[in-house]
Image (tube, helix red, strand yellow):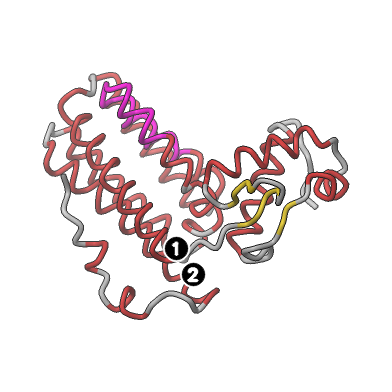
Amino acid sequence: MPNLTKNSTIAETILKSLSKEIVSGAIEPGMKLEEKTLADQYGVSRTPVRDALRQLSSTGLVEFRPRRGVTVVNMGIEGLLEMFETQSELEGLCARLAATRMTAVERLQLETLHENSKNTIDLGNIEEYSKLNEQIHELIYIGAHNKSMHQITASFRQRLAPFRSSIFFRTKGRMTESYQEHGQIIEAISDSDADKAGKAAHDHTISSSVNVLDYFQNRKGSVESAVLSDPGMIVNTPLA
């Protein structure tokens, strides 16, 4: 059972723990998540458990069913493909806008975050790199200077958070690849090259999705071979 530390709320800690177990397969699709059982498991009241389940529902990993409670969803390959396809388009659009709208101060902040993330790779600090990774993406959303786009992209990115935290940077070499991809995005933004920035951000998201698809193929064996044998189904998705 995870430690319920002061660094995050109890609900957030429970949310992260349940997300990790669902993505890893420890909690299988179709299983019911009972508030009382979870409250006893974590040694807390039902209120933070209820909050965690509500947040978990927003990621699409579980669903509330009338008179049946909370049930773990069977996340199929088609659903994942759709989510990553959508996220790649949103990330690309934010980067395109940031390339022409980001202020000099925001560009400097972005470059600083990128340099700091390199230090975490040298130290092999996955958790710190993950935090800086989120800050880099968030700053690009801010730099787009479009509140609606910022809200939509950040919200959708949150839906994919359980997959990123459980899989992405634990794949050998993924942190280095991510750092290099960030470099391409940031360079394009610094050059005010909207087309290049949009494509780099789009491709960065697709590159990340490959790790998830591979993971689910190895864990479930339910990924259709046609999808993985033809990565163009997602990699060649046109950038709007």
Q: Position of residue 172 (x, y in %)?
A: 46, 66
27 and 168: which one is in front? 27
Residue 8, compared with residue 197, is above or below; it is above
Residue, disc 1: 212
Q: Specify the segment rendered in magenta.
A: 132-154
Q: Determine the image quadrant of residue 80.
A: bottom left
Q: Counting other residues with Cα less than 10 Å from the Cα at mark 1, is it few (<14), some (14-19), or many (20 or more)?
A: many
Q: Tell me the tag on residue 150.
A: none
Quadrant holding the C terminus: top left
**Amino acid identity at mark 1:** Val
- Label 2: state its secondary structure: helix
Q: Residue at x 19, y 42 (%)?
A: 198
136 and 221: which one is in front? 221
Q: Position of residue 32 (x, y in %)?
A: 72, 56
Q: Contact (CB < 8 A) between labels 2 and 1?
A: yes
Residue, disc 2: 216
On screen, residue 193 versus residue 237, left or right, reads left
On screen, residue 179 versus residue 11, left or right, reads left
- Label 1: state its secondary structure: helix
109 and 227: which one is in front? 227
Q: Residue at x 51, y 59 (%)?
A: 167
**Amino acid identity at mark 2:** Phe
